[in-house]
Amino acid sequence: MVGVMLGVTVLIVVISVMTGFDRELRQKVVDWDAHILVSTDDVLRDWRDLTVKIRNTPDVVATAPYVQGPVIVEYQHQRLAPLIRGIDPVEEEKVIPELKKFIKKGSLDLDGESTVIGIELARKLHIDVGDKLTVYSPGNLGDILDGMKELEKSKGDEERKAVDKLREVVLPKELTVTGIFETGHYMHDSEFLLVPIYVGQELYGLGDALHGITVRTVDPYGAERVKREIEKFLQPPQYAQTWIDMNNQFFEAVRLERTVMFFLLFFIIIVAAFGIMNTLITVTVQKTRDIGLMKAIGAKIPQIVGVFLGQGIIVGLFGTLMGLGLGMTLVRYRNEFKDWLASTAHIEVFPSKVYSLAKLPAEVVPRDVAIICIGAFLICCIFAFLPAYRAARLDPVKALHYE
């Protein structure tokens, strides 16, 4: 009974957590990323005309320009290499309405030389609202190399001019931190800083060009259909990606892991069912004389089967019910249990750095719970039926031969 209980408990907890993890991951992605991203292999120069066409596409709610790429940031001799996302706050809020709710400190103020950074990035740099952050961009790397070559060849006044030119090229941006955001997604919170779009354009030397356009649709799960409509007027190397395309590896990994875990953990119940079968086989051997006597006085096969099958059904039923109760309890208090393990046994069950989520998510799907409980009960019944049928087929003459 305990074996069945543990099998059902573990299955309910693991499947609920994996389902919740998939749901939470998708929600975090939808809250932070646009439903569709229109970009190119180089830069978008005719983005204004393209924006008009995209906005006229059916089921498109809003669009916003963006610049995104890696930079080097420095604060008090600490250096990291996060990603900048240059945005127009007014247009970006139309594409990502949840943007302001992520601000945990300060405000979404991107006027002038300012930036809003992720909470994990702020912790790593030990930086706070009001501090100034130095940003170096790899976008002008080609200009730096050209300047160094020119410096090597120049002499006298030409050398001084070349040095001044090089100094202008490598001069970093100094941005004031006006806000700190927290999405709950570790990768977003540790690797992004938001800047005004013109700052992103300056850092990457884009002029008036962009890296892409973000698009919000009526339904995020219908983005694939809208993407196909947008692709009709895109010119190579321009392309469109949905939020599912951009994060497909994560979603597929979670789906595959959930399926594999379901089948692997179901073997716990099968092992428990083997225990039930072995117990009943032992009882059958021990009760050979009694079975022979009952059959000799007229007991029928269904009656004998019912005695032993009933024992297996009781074990399976109560084991399943106890597993259901314990599993639902653990799902309800999963985060408290996780924190207790971390503080008492120093076991980190769900590290946020690995899984990109601050809390252990879970979602109980009635269909999954029903499949687990009914499957466990049926397995116990099937494994109990085998020794029960063996007992019922016992020849009373052989059973009572030595009595």
Image (cartoon, rainbow, N blue to C red):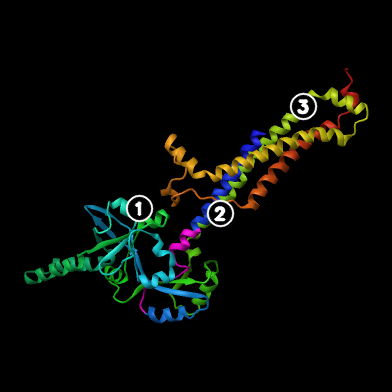
Residue 315: say if magenta: no
Would you name the residue on which mark 1 appears?
120
- Counting from the top left corner in percent of width and height, residue 258 is at 57, 50
Classify residue 28 as left or right of residue 80: right
| Mark closer to the chain start, 2 or 1 | 1
Q: From the viewer's side, name the closer residue of 211 and 178.
A: 178
State how many labels appear: 3
- Mark sitting on residue 283: 3
Q: Assess disc 2: are there few (<14), some (14-19) or many (≥20) residues with their C-alpha within 10 Å of its C-alpha.
A: some
| Mark closer to the chain start, 2 or 3 | 2
Q: Does the residue at mark 2 contact the one at mark 3 (Cβ under 8 Å)?
A: no
- Counting from the top left corner in percent of width and height, residue 189 is at 38, 56
Give the alpha-carbon distance from disc 2 to disc 3, as whole Å: 43 Å
Q: Which residues are magenta?
A: 26-45
Residue 30: say if magenta: yes
Observer-side mark, 1 or 3, equals: 1
Q: Assess disc 3: are there few (<14), some (14-19) or many (≥20) residues with their C-alpha within 10 Å of its C-alpha.
A: some
Q: Residue at x 36, y 70 (%)?
A: 89
- Counting from the top left corner in percent of width and height, residue 114 is at 27, 65
Q: Assess disc 1: are there few (<14), some (14-19) or many (≥20) residues with their C-alpha within 10 Å of its C-alpha.
A: many
Establish if 85 lies above or below 78: below
